Image (cartoon, rainbow, N blue to C red):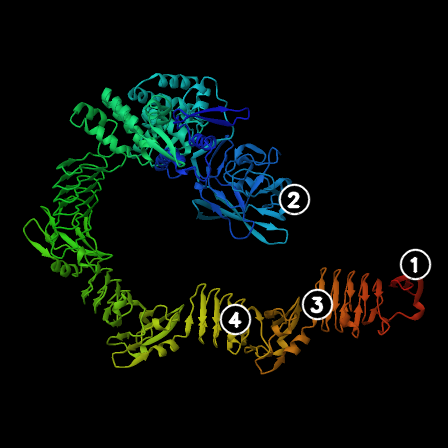
């Protein structure tokens, strides 16, 4: 036997000492218990491997379970806990990722000093933060951007959400935060790398360190949920390289019940002598609270002095209220007191207010129960439940939550005071490193206590077996002791009635009560009873509440009474009645009788009897006639629906096993239905929506009106849906592959599913739009039989997505019906083998498939996807995306800005495709295959991406009215644009050959005009060598080919790269460069600076510089080699005597003089003397 004592060292650490007397078992808090156990192992010199971790669980699990029950009650009061919405940046590009509130992260969102459980973000993403006090860390949610952020320049205003907070810092009003705003250089990203809710070294970096240029607050609403959290709004931020990332306003789920104070409150000398209890929600530990509240300390001293449970329990309301008064949070009553509102105005009793104050304090968030909306002079109290009064449901939940809190605090302080003398009698010892417990002395002590004071003694034992772990979590079965002690007073009405005020005698915390073989009569309570009998013929009445009654081995009568009951007959010939409420009845083996009376509600009968001779009967009570019930099915269950809407469900009555079937239904008038009668009546349909399930036998099921669900299960079935939008299903079991089914959808739009079996689908004129799902096997043969009046020329096959639709036409060509073969293009085996017409004509599956290669879009925005087959795809109107996938395809975009794609698959390089963009600005993409691009007058501005290979042949065919003299080829960057001109030379359309100057293979081989004229790829390329700038400052680059580039006006930068280039700067101060690459050694270039002061640079090539009168003051940098020839050509009006040659430092300046000798221009040969 050991006694634990403890001290606190100068650093505040708890030191545990062990002496060989008795074990002190305090349950002050889970943390405290863990400290005790850790010290116990060290002090006793036990190896870590031999110290049984289950001992720790004995102390902590029960308390944690109690706290969990309280949390459950809080969640029942309000499922709309307040959400927090800081701004999060997706730093790794995989979307913002979050973790659940139950992960245990605590954070002070509102700066109250109380950290509460919260959802959180992954370590790969980051919060946008502003370190307001410049202490190098993020202290609380006031330094995030969310609904606790104070607006910049408006310290009294709180932001509605993160983006509104960010907007307040936009000093120049440009819709984003960037280096133009003062706050930009103070903003940081907090990556919580260790997921502990505390900002630490290495977790904070400035936007500039991350390379983030700007953050937009122009958000959109998205409302996505993830791990219990919600992304409500999204915007974007921009990296320094121009890429964008997501910014999300992430509304974290919160658990205000799980909380911790940022700072501990010092415990007074007086409080240190009092019992302690773990704080949670918005309250500190009991000793910390007593150090703040002298009234609470006084009540605890009074509690310690009391010697019985009744008196201590009577004091708990006051203790809890004073304890809650120490909470840092304002209660709802406090909120109302400040605005002079009398709570009675809102019909809430004073006792309710007191309990609410306690719950709010321990829950940690007033908003978890109510929302208070203030105005200048009044407030509106609105429970989230839905009205302005505490409804009975809400009041029940409040009382349950309050009771759970009271239990948790009471048991902790009682175990340290009055109950300590009882728990000290439990002796433990160690044997081979394991704990052993001896309860002999405890049983004597508690027995003596109960004899002296039966009520308080039994209630103390009741508390201990519920909450004390050495009685609930060890091998010792404390409840058996309680039941044996309780049985001694079963005849004492005074004791039992008094106990009943605190204990629901049948529902002991949902523990099971198993009666002996002798029990003949058990009457339950109005609570949730769990009653189990053994042998004997028993009568069990559950009375009120949701009860569980189990009869055992005898012939039992079980009546659930009111409530949703579960009743199990067990062995024997049992009689079961659920009573009112939604009940489940399970008879078991034996001849069982199920009784159902009018008003008994919804009942499920789960009959399972292995005996083939047993007779199980459903007896329907007075007032229920055969004409009053309707039969339907749901998942192989037979549903018997009464006139009042209530239903009796016979589970698996229509399943494969006979063990689930009842033998008959008996009516009060003496009539009855056998199992066969039931089946026959069940298949009788109505004009309403019926649900009918067949059997394993061959069934004939005929639907009538209504939208019916008919399932044949197995066997060779005949199913007829009749009128309405019906669903027919056959052959789902593997054994059905040798069966033959007939399915008639009838009038209406039907869904018909055939599986393993051979299926015949019958469709008649006027049967609407049916969909057939055929999952045939190789051994099955499936066909569609079309009725009279439908000939072969009245049916067209059209591909729609992966389906084939057989459209039925009338004599005018109008669609009057259709049959869709779902998934035909996914798996050819999912198409019927034949379509048979009334005149004997037949369409085979292959013929259907070939005729359905055409896909038609709509007038809207379509996505059409071809297949590996050759297809015709028409987008019609709208901005369509059409991908031919593979095969020899014909793609027509129709009107709209369309994207057409072909030939992406490597095996498609020998295919030949035709692409017609149609009207609108289209993108046409050809790949390995050979493509023909068709462009007609009025087709807009199209872009062709051609990624051809050496063996493919690609062409553009220009339609009627487009001749060669109406087309102009222009280079634009690395592209060639064929501009279509009208008679006034205005551009009315264009075709851009994207990337032509990057790779010559990316240009079509020929362009054919409407008169038959052809342009080859080289001719197109040569034609497009001319590049023309604008009247602004241009930057133009040539290519490795021979280019002609005209800068026009503006200060232009023109680089010919390589080739024999002609560069003309035009007006402005231009820079012209040629011949920089080694490929230019043998090139001959011409450079014309034009008017303005120009810089002309020639390199390894041979250059001709042209200067005309009025061209200003040009500078020539010539880096020629010995093998090149460079010359300067002076234009008309410049004679030799008008040129003056001067040395200027290392340069030579040729000054151009007018007739009066004035300098009107110059050409400087830079570095001539160097």
Residue at 92% across / 58% down in the picture?
Answer: 1145
Residue at which label 1 appears: 1145
Question: Disc 3 to disc 4, how far (Cα)?
Answer: 35 Å
Which is nearer the N-term, disc 1 or disc 2?
Answer: 2
Q: Which of marks 2 and 4 is in front?
A: 4
Q: Are marks 1 and 2 in contact (CB under 8 Å)?
A: no
Tell me which numbered mark, 2 or 4, is placed earlier along the sequence: 2
Q: Element under label 2?
A: loop
Q: Callout 3: helix, strand or loop?
A: strand
Distance from disc 1 to disc 3, alpha carbons, whole Å, reads: 37 Å
Residues marked 1 and 3 touching at CB (< 8 Å): no
> Is the residue marked by circle 2 packed among few (<14), some (14-19), or many (20+) residues within 10 Å?
some
Q: Distance between the residues labelled 1 and 4?
A: 63 Å
Residue 768 percent location from the top left of the image: 28, 67
User: Would residue 650 be visible to someone looking at this image?
Assistant: yes
The residue wearing badge 2 is 180
Secondary structure at numbered mark 1 = loop
Q: Quadrant of the C terminus?
A: bottom right
Q: Indicate the position of residue 114 as horizontal and vertical percent values.
A: 48, 31
Please name the residue that numbered disc 3 is placed on.
1028
Q: Name the residue under label 4.
A: 904
């Amino acid at each position: 036997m050991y006694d634990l004592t403890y001290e606190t060292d100068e650093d505040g650490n708890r030191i545990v000492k062990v002496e060989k007397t008795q074990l002190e078992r305090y349950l002050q808090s889970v943390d405290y218990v863990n400290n005790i156990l850790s010290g116990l192992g060290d002090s006793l010199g036990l190896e870590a491997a031999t110290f049984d971790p289950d001992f720790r669980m004995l102390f902590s699990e029960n308390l944690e379970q109690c706290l969990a029950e309280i949390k459950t009650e809080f969640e029942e009061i309000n499922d709309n806990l307040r959400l927090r919405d800081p701004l999060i940046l997706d730093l790794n590009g995989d979307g913002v990722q979050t973790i659940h509130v139950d992960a245990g992260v605590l954070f002070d969102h509102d700066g109250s000093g109380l950290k509460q459980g919260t959802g959180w973000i992954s370590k790969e993403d980051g919060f946008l933060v502003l370190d307001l006090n410049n202490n190098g860390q993020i202290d609380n949610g006031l330094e995030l951007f969310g609904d606790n952020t104070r607006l910049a320049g408006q310290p009294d205003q709180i932001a509605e959400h993160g983006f509104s907070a960010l907007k307040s810092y936009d000093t120049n009003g440009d819709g984003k935060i960037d280096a133009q705003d003062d706050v930009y250089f103070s903003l940081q990203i907090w990556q919580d790398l260790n997921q502990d809710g505390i900002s630490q070294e290495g977790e904070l970096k400035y936007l500039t360190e991350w390379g983030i240029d700007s953050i937009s607050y122009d958000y959109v609403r998205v409302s996505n949920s993830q791990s219990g959290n919600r992304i409500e709004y999204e915007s974007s931020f921009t990296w320094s390289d121009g890429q964008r990332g997501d910014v999300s306003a992430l509304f974290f789920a919160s658990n205000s019940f799980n909380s911790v104070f940022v700072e501990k409150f010092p415990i007074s000398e007086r409080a240190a002598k009092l019992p302690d209890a773990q704080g949670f929600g918005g309250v500190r530990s009991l000793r910390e609270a007593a150090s703040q509240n002298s009234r609470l300390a006084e009540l605890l001293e009074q509690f310690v002095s009391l010697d019985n449970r009744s008196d201590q329990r009577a004091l708990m309301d006051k203790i809890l209220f004073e304890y809650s008064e120490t909470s840092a949070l304002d209660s709802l009553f406090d909120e109302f007191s400040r605005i002079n509102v009398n709570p009675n105005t809102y019909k809430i009793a004073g006792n309710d207010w007191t309990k609410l104050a306690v719950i709010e304090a321990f829950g940690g968030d007033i908003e978890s129960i109510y929302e208070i909306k203030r105005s200048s002079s009044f407030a509106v109290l609105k429970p989230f439940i839905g009205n302005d009064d505490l409804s009975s449901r809400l009041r029940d939940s409040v009382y349950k939550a309050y009771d759970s809190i009271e239990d948790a605090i009471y048991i902790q302080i009682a175990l340290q005071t009055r109950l300590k003398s009882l728990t000290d009698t439990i002796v433990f010892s160690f044997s081979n490193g394991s704990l052993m417990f001896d309860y002999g002395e405890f049983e004597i002590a508690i027995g003596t206590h109960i004899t002296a004071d039966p009520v308080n003694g039994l209630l103390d034992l009741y508390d201990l077996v519920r909450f004390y772990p050495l009685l609930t979590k060890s091998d010792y079965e404390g409840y058996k002791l309680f039941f044996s002690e309780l049985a001694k007073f079963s005849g004492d009405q005074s004791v039992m009635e008094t106990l009943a005020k605190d204990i629901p005698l049948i529902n002991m915390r949902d523990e099971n009560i198993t009666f002996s073989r002798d029990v003949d009569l058990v009457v339950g309570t109005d609570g949730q009873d769990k009653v189990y009998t053994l042998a004997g013929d028993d009568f069990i009445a559950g009375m009120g509440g949701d009860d569980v009654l189990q009869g055992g081995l005898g012939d039992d009568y079980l009546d659930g009474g009111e409530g949703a009951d579960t009743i199990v007959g067990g062995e024997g010939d049992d009689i079961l009645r659920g009573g009112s409420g939604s009940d489940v009845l399970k008879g078991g083996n034996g001849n069982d009788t199920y009784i159902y009376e009018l008003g008994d509600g919804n009942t499920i009968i789960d009959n399972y009897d292995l005996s083939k001779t047993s007779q199980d009967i459903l007896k329907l009570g007075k007032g229920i006639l055969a004409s009053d019930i309707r039969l339907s099915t749901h998942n192989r269950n037979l549903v018997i629906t009464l006139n009042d809407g209530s239903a009796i469900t016979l589970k698996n009555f229509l399943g494969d096993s006979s063990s689930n079937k009842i033998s008959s239904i008996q009516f009060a008038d003496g009539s009855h239905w056998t199992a066969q009668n039931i089946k026959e009546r069940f298949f009788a349909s109505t004009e309403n929506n019926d649900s009918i399930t067949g059997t394993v036998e061959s069934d004939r099921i005929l639907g009538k009106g209504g939208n019916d669900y008919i399932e044949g299960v197995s066997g060779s079935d005949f199913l007829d849906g009749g009128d309405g939008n019906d669903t027919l299903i056959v052959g789902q079991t593997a054994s059905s592959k040798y069966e033959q089914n007939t399915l008639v959808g009838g009038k209406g739009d039907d869904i018909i599913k055939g599986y393993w079996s051979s299926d015949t689908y019958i469709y008649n004129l006027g049967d609407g739009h049916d969909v057939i799902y055929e999952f045939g096997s190789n051994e099955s043969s499936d066909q569609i039989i079309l009725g009279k009046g439908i000939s072969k020329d009245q049916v067209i096959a059209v591909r729609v997505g992966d389906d084939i639709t057989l459209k039925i036409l009338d004599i005018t060509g109008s669609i009057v019906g259709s049959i869709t073969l779902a998934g035909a293009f996914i798996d050819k085996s999912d198409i019927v083998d034949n379509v048979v017409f009334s005149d004997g004509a037949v369409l085979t599956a292959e013929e259907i498939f070939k005729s359905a290669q055409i896909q038609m879009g709509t007038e809207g925005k379509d996505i059409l996807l071809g297949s590996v087959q050759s297809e015709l795809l028409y987008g019609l109107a709208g901005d369509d995306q059409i991908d031919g996938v593979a095969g020899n395809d014909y793609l027509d975009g129709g009107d709209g800005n369309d994207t057409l794609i072909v030939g992406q698959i490597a095996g498609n390089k020998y295919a030949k495709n035709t692409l017609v963009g149609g009207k609108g600005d289209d993108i046409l993409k050809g790949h390995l295959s050979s493509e023909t691009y068709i462009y007609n007058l009025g087709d807009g501005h199209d872009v062709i991406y051609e990624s051809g290979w050496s063996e493919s042949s690609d062409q553009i065919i220009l339609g009627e009215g487009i001749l060669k003299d109406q087309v102009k080829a222009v280079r634009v960057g690395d592209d060639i644009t064929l501009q279509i001109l009208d008679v006034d030379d205005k551009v009315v359309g264009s075709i851009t050959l994207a990337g032509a100057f990057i790779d010559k293979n990316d240009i079509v081989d020929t362009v054919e005009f409407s008169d038959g004229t052809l342009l080859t790829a080289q001719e197109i390329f040569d034609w497009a060598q001319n590049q023309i700038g604008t009247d602004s400052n241009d930057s133009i680059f040539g290519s490795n080919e021979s280019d002609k580039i005209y800068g026009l006006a503006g200060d232009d930068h023109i680089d010919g790269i390589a080739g024999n280039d002609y560069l003309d700067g035009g007006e402005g101060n231009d820079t012209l460069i040629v011949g920089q690459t080694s490929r230019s050694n043998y090139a001959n270039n011409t450079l014309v600076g034009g008017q303005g002061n120009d810089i002309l640079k020639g390199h390894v090539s041979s250059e001709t510089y042209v200067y005309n009168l009025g061209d200003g003051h040009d500078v020539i940098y010539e880096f020629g080699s010995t093998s090149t020839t460079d010359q300067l050509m002076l234009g008309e009006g410049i004679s030799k005597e008008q040129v003056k040659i001067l040395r200027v430092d290392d340069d030579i300046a040729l000054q151009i003089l007018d007739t009066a000798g004035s300098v009107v221009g110059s050409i400087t040969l830079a570095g001539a003397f160097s």
